[in-house]
Image: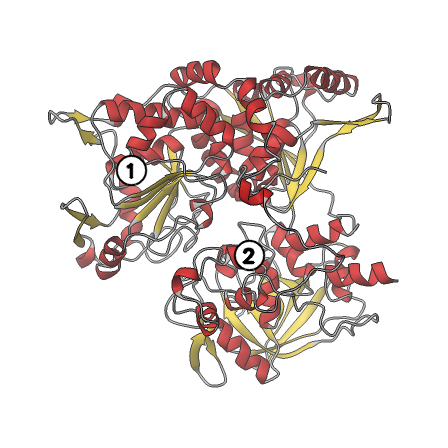
Amino acid sequence: MLIIPPGSGIVHQVNLEYLARVVFQDAKKDGAVRMLYPDSVVGTDSHTTMINGLGVVGWGVGGIEAEAVMLGQAISMLLPEVIGYKLVGKLSPLVTSTDLVLTITKHLRQIGVVGKFVEFFGPGVSELSIADRATISNMCPEYGATVGYFPVDKNALEYLRQTNRAEEKVRVIEAYLKATDQLRDFGNAEQDPVFTQIVELDLASVVTSVSGPKRPHDRVSVSEMKQDFRECLTNKVGFKGFAVPEAELAAEGTFSWTDGKTYSLKHGSVVIAAITSCTNTSNPSVMLGAGLLAKKAVEAGLKVAPYIKTSLSPGSGVVTYYLKESGVIPALEELGFNVVGYGCMTCIGNSGPLDDNVANTIEKNNLVCCGVLSGNRNFEGRIHPNTRANYLASPLLVIAYALAGTVDIDFEKQPIGTRPDGSAVFLRDIWPTRQEIQAVEKQHVIPAMFRDVYEKVELGSPAWQGLNAPTGKLYPWDGASTYIKRPPFFEGMTRDLPTIGNIVNARALLNLGDSVTTDHISPAGSIARNSPAARFLSDRGLTPRDFNSYGSRRGNDDIMARGTFANIRLVNKLVPRPGPRTLHIPSGEEMDVFDCAQRYAGEGTPLIALVGKDYGSGSSRDWAAKGPYLLGIRAVIAESYERIHRSNLVGMGIVPLQYLAGENAESLGLTGQETFSIAIPANCKPHERITVSTDGGKQFEVIARFDTEVDLEYFRNGGILNYMIRKMID
């Protein structure tokens, strides 16, 4: 077992660069190879799929399921369909792997691949580096598949050598894969497998792109960005709309900065620009491309406005190493892109606060300001409370939009800035070609870097080395800690199975729409000062500067329960405005979601949630199931579920129900203000139809989304962890 300390990099990138074996070599005591078998991985993060780019089958599961695996439980799943995604042609020298992955993400979301495997094949795959492939595989959760797999080929073997894997091991891997017909030649169509379905993409059709303003699969070509953003401003509120009134389109606010200058913000102004997240920071082509762009920008005399919050958070120490060796770090720092650490930062909402002058100007003028980041996800409220529009982009475009200071720009027609002599600089003047980037990569990304970084990765920082670990078999809970608390999930648990009963006269705690993400359900970002979680911490003597984030307090159920459905952009149809609020139906009183759930609990009222399509998309966040469980939610009725979240709900004993095809709350005339009774058979079967009745006399059937008998066994036990405890003590 290897333990990689925190601060060493993003785990998916460390896995790609260091941990992954591709083929496991089980050795005897004398060191001789006893058995060879393919590498695989199950991770507690949805982006575990990144390793698929190196030919390793792996996918993410929820923390609840992973905890059961650690206790010895096997993972079960339905046999998936396998979609063949054929790549042909070559990328334009001016586009990046980020542009490609955003194109694929939109395409596969349109096709619908939730719960399916996607395997990439065709001659175009040979045109992609392993880092390019890993970028595509990393975004697998955003297009909804279980895996996005690239079989091993000669390029993968060369990557192992480049990242300092031992030559003898690489030779064994190659011999094993050849002997078992697993080493692929993407130019040989005779090796192509038989797929459930085949779709195709010509790489030459890919154009420079971003995705947003609220979802990863809403791709926009950069050439259409200005028009698209302006349309989003006036569109009705939705994934592509903010409903800004015509009279407020020209809204503008000014503020003074510490340099003595006055700056202005408008709709579209960029206030956060971050090169972040494992999606792109694993890829030398886009990271070095960003560095070369920065270097050319500095040489042209361009600057980034000082109020824009800029950052660079590489996925591993190797990235910093080759950025330094290639000489681009000074230019990146000149533009404000200093290395701020290694890990998930802005992409998960850890950008830190904006300057008060900036935040106040945005709020006072009700501006739609923007974040631009090289991350995976841009769901509402995830990146920052003050950036209502957020766009995913390549590291190069992150710098470009930071230089421009706005997304309301047509780079083809408008200059990105001016030289000191007043002459215009266009983005095309400073944009590096793929050939320029590859030349620098070939010179500076070498095996010695990976050796130097990873030979000491297990040491960690002095702070890590100085930690005192408690002794003994039982964890010594600190009752005063606001970070780590003994969880309540097993209180009152008995050896005997609980009785499965019907859900009678339940109230809908929330009535939500489509694409409600785990960030809407259980945000990981900062704790708002007026939230139930903030009140809880204040009562314990903490000041706002010490509140920290929900992500940092995942070990405390008191905080996390109060943070459930605490996203400031949550749209709940029971209340008139977005926010973490709902309606206590018997009294008609609007209140915070947590407070409402507490009142219902005091009244002995069971709860459900009504939701739309793709419920639980985004991060594999176990608290998105644990939190609703603690609020008293017994069942969810949705149009469809993301794979990991459905599994997490089952793992917490929450019943995942699905409307029949073509039906939803609106078509059935449900407002969410009814009472609901759900007849759950004691011997319920996978995908059995069960009946829901309301106090208004409506009856409708739903599908019980227990997909396997194992799911039902977990449910009968009250959850997967309860099942494991009973199994261990029997």
Q: Of label 2 and label 1, which has the lower sequence position?
A: 1
Picture coordinates of residue 11, whole percent (x, y): 58, 39
Q: Nearer the viewer, residue 7 or 653?
A: 7
Q: Amino acid at mark 2?
A: Tyr
Picture coordinates of residue 91, whole percent (x, y): 45, 21
Q: Element at badge 2?
A: loop
Q: Is residue 573 visible?
A: no
Quadrant housing the N terminus: top right
Proximity of marks 2 and 1: CB atoms separated by less than 8 Å: no
Picture coordinates of residue 28, whole percent (x, y): 86, 26
Q: Element at badge 1?
A: helix
Would you identify the image quadrant in which residue 209 lies?
Answer: top left
Q: Nearer the viewer, residue 699 or 11?
A: 11
Q: Report the disc number at residue 615.
A: 2
Image height of 176 relative to 247, above or below: above
Residue farthest to the right, as pictured: 730
Residue hosting label 1? 402
Quadrant housing the C terminus: bottom right
Picture coordinates of residue 676, whole percent (x, y): 60, 76
Q: Amino acid at mark 1?
A: Ala
Image height of 441 relative to 261, above or below: above
Mark 2 or 1, closer to the camera:
1
Position of 22 with respect to 697 (left or right) is right
Position of 588 with respect to 337 (left or right) is right
